[in-house]
Amino acid sequence: MSSVPRFWRNLGSRYNLEGTRCNECGENFYPPRNVCVNCRRVGQIEPYKFKGTGEIISYTLIHTAAEGFEGQAPYTLAIIQLDEGPRLTSQVVGSPEKIHIGMRVRSVFRKLGEDGERGMIYYGTKFVPENA
Amino acid sequence: MRDVAIIGVKNTKFGELWERSLRDIVVEAGIGAIQDADVSGKEIDTLYIGNMSGGRFIEQEHIGALIADYSGLSKNLHVPATRVEAACASGGLALRQAIMAVASGYSDIVVAAGAEKMTDVGSEEASSALAAAADREWEGMAGATFPGLYAMIARLHMHRYGTTSEQLAEVAVKNHKNGHLNPIAQYKNLITVDQVLNSIMVADPLHIFDCSPITDGASALVLAPADVAHKYTDTPIYIRATAQASDTIALHDRRDITTLDATVVAAERAYSMAKLRPEDIDLVEVHDCFTIAEICAIEDLGFAEKGKGGIVTANGETAIGGRIPVNTSGGLKACGHPVGATGIKQAVEIVTQLRGEAGKRQVEGAEYGMTHNVGGSGATAVVHIFSRER
Amino acid sequence: MTIGIVSYGAYVPRYRIKIEEIARLWGDNAEALKNGLMVYEKSVPDIDEDAATIAVEAARYAMARSGVDPDRIGAVYTGSESHPYAVKPTSTIIAQAIGATPNMTAADFEFACKAGTAAVQACMGLVGSGMIDLGMAIGADVSQGAPSDALEYTAAAGGVACIIGKKESELAAIIEDTYSFTTDTPDFWRREGMPYPEHGGRFTGEPGYFKHVTNGAKGLLEKLGTKPEDYDYAVFHQPNGKFPSKVAKTLGFTKAQITPGLVVPKIGNTYSGSCLMGIAATLDQAKPGDRIFATAFGSGAGSDAFSITVTDRIEEIRNRAPKVSELIKDPIYIDYARYARHKGKIRLA
C-alpha cells in the first residue's frame, strides 16, 4: 500500500462503509462514485452509509498471497453483495470453514495490512459470517 | 476507410530469457517482422507498441521512444512511436491503433509490436505489478490477486453451471498439447488432468497449472493498406474486424461475474463489422490467462452455449481437428504470457495459420481466424477477425 | 450531580487456547496451573485483530446499545498497554470508526490493567464539569506474555467501552462515587520498544495487587459509608481467578457476589479490559436497583474503585448488543502453533 494519503482520503468508506447514492435512479454505490453509471450527467449523487450486512456472491481461498498479505495466507476473499445493492471485494475472516455462495455476512473492523514494522497500519472493513 | 492487411509477422522465443533485455527482444521481433514483410526502415510511417508495465518490470517508461531508438528508427528517420497500455490487452490495443492508422489513411506501413520483460523482478513483485490491472484501491487493498479474482469467476461458474475442476484442467492439457507443437512456446511438455489437479493450489479452485506463467517475449506485425499488400508478400492476411469494449474495472461491479460483457460486446461488434457469425470462424486465439478464462471466452465469443464451455472443452471440440480449434499456439497457458506481447502474438499465430505455415499444428483449410485479448479481469476486451481472402 | 454509564459494549475475539496446550509446549503441569490460576483457557486475537480493532468493536456495540447520536460524544479515551502505535493515538481510530469526529477530543491512556477505568474517571470529570455531553472510555488489550513466562497462561485479548453521561433518563447505571489509591510500585513494566513485559513474580502479589485493591476498595467503602453486604455484585481486577477470589474474601465479599463478573477462567486476563469486562458481564444480568462494587488494579501501581447502582434503563438497552456470555459462548480452539502465528510470535522474513 505504502501511500498514507491515498489510504487516508478514503477512511470514511473503509471504516464505515460510506458510499454514495443517486437520487435520480435510486442506485447505491460502494465504493463511492461521483458519477452515476445510469444517469451520468443528470444523476443526483449524495452520501449514503451502508448497514454492513449482505451475502456472498463468490469466494476463493487465496494460498499465494498478494504482496503485503503473506502473513495472512491462506485467507478467504469474497465478492459480497450488500443488502442495499452494491457489491464489493473483501476478506471474510473468523475461520469461515462453512463458507458458501449465498452465505449471510456482516461487517467487522479489522487490520487490512501494514507497511512493514515501521509503517502505517491500515484498518478497515472485513466480513464475518452473520451469526458469528 | 481503407482495408488493411498484415504483411509481416515475428515472435521471439517465449520464456525466461535471462540473457535478453526488453530492447533486445523487441528489436528481434520488430526486425523479424520487417524482414518477413520485406519493407525497409524508410518505409515505416509509425510504430505502436503494447507494453503493460515497463515501469514496474524494468523501471523504464517511455517505451515507445526506447524501442524506436534501438530499432534504428529514431536517429535518422525519426519515426513516431507510441506505447499503448491496457494491462494484458496492451498488445491487442496496439494492433487496433495500427489498424486505425492505416485504415484512416494517416499512415501506410505501420509496425504493431508488443513486448514484456517480466523476469527481471521476482515473482512476488511481478504478481504485484500484474495486480495493478485490477482496482488497486478496492480489490488490491482487500488482498485480491489475479488468480484470486479468476478463482471467484471459476467458483461461481462451477456453482451455477456445474463446471468441474477436471474440465478446467482439460483446458490446460489441451493448450500444453498445442504448445508442444509450437517452437516458440514456453512450455512444450505434455501434461495430464491429474497433474493439473495435483498441482499446488494458488487460489481455490485454481491450481498453479490453471494459471498462465510469467514470461519474457516480444511479437511484431507489419501492416499495410490491402491495396498494396501484394507488393510485399504473396500471402497477405486481411483484417476483417477490429472491435474493443470496456467494462467496470472491478470484477465485483460487473453485471454477471461469470460473463465478460466486454468480450460479448467486442465480439458482437466484430462479427457485425466482418459480417460473419461464430460458425464462420475456423480457429481462435483466446485470452486464457487462467483455464476458467478460456471457458468463459469460448462462451462469450459464441463458440459454446453459456455454461457449456467446460463440456465443450472436455469433448475435444476446441482441440486442433475439433469443431473450433482454440489456442493452437498453446495459448497464454503453454505458449506463455508476456502481457504486453500477448495480443500481438495471438495475431501472429492467426496469420501463420491462415498463411498455412503452422506446421504440425496447422488447422487445415482455415479461412477465418479470430483473436481475443483481455485486460485485467475483463475491463477491456479487444477482438480481431482475420481472413485469408480479401 | 448524577453521573453514570449510559451504555457499554464488550468484545472478545473468538479464538481460545487451553492451558493444557501451552503447558504441553513448555512441559508444565497443566492441572497444577489451572488449580493455581483458576484459569482454564484464554482468548487469542485473530491475525488481523489488535487493541484498536477490539476497541472499535466494543465501542460500536456500546453505540448500538445506547442509540445516542455519535456527534454527542465529546471525548474518546482508550486505555491499553498494547496500543498499536507508540506514537499516534488509538482513540482517533475509534472516534472515526464510530462517527464521533471531528468536534471532540481524544487521547490514549496507559496504566497497565487499569488504564480503562482511569479513562472512565477522566470522562466522569469532563462530563461532570460540563465540558462534554458524553464521553467514551475504553479498555482494550491484546496483552503479551513472553513465551514460557507465567504470564503466557493468562495474557488474553478483549475490550470494553463505556459511554459516560449525566442525563438521568439516559443512565443505565449511576456511578455514585469513585476512589483511587496510587503509589509508585514497580511490580510490572514494559520498556519502550520491548515486545514483552517484565514482572516481579510474587512481588506483584502482596505489595502490588492486594495492597492496592484492598486500600482502594476500603477507601471507597469508608468514603460512602457502605459495607460489602450493601452490594448485590462485586468485581475485582481479574489477572487470574485466584486473586479476585482471595481479595473479595479478605474484604468481606462473598463468592456469590463476584461469580457473575468473574469471566477470567474462560477468557483469561484482558488487562485494560479486565475489570470493565467483569462490570459488563454483571450489568448483563443485574436488575434495576442492584448495586455493584468494582475495583480495578493497574500495576505500577494503583487501584480505581467504583460504586454503581443499576437503573430501570438497563432493561431497555441490555439486549441491543451482545452480552459477554454471548460473545464468549462459541470459541474456536487453536493449537500453540496457530496461537504463535496470531500473536505475531512467528516473524516472516
Image: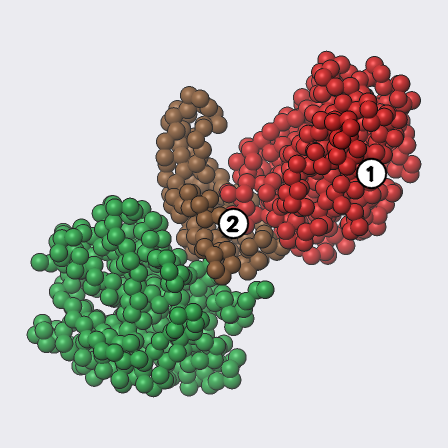
Chain colours: A brown, B red, C green
The chain under label 2 reads A
Crowd tier of the residue under label 1, counting other residues whose Cα lies within 10 Å: few below 14, some 14–19, many 20 or above: some
Quarter occupied by residue C114: bottom left
Q: Position of residue C125 (x, y in %)?
A: 16, 60
Residue drawn at the location 45% of the way across and 76% of the way down: C146
Q: CA distance from mark 1 to mark 2?
A: 37 Å
Q: Position of residue B302 (x, y in %)?
A: 71, 28
Q: Which residue is mark 2?
A: A1
Same chain, labels 1 and 2: no
Q: Which residue is mark 1?
A: B28
Q: Is residue B143 or residue B24 the one in the foreground?
A: B24
Q: Position of residue B147 (x, y in %)?
A: 64, 47
Q: Is residue C185 or residue B106 the one in the foreground?
A: B106
Q: Which amino acid, by three-letter code, is at mark 1?
A: Glu
Q: Mark 1, mark 2: which one is toward the viewer?
A: 1
Marker count (numbered):
2
Q: Quadrant of the N terminus of chain B?
A: top right
Circles 1 and 2, Cβ within 8 Å, touching? The answer is no
Residue drawn at the location 88% of the way across and 26% of the way down: B38
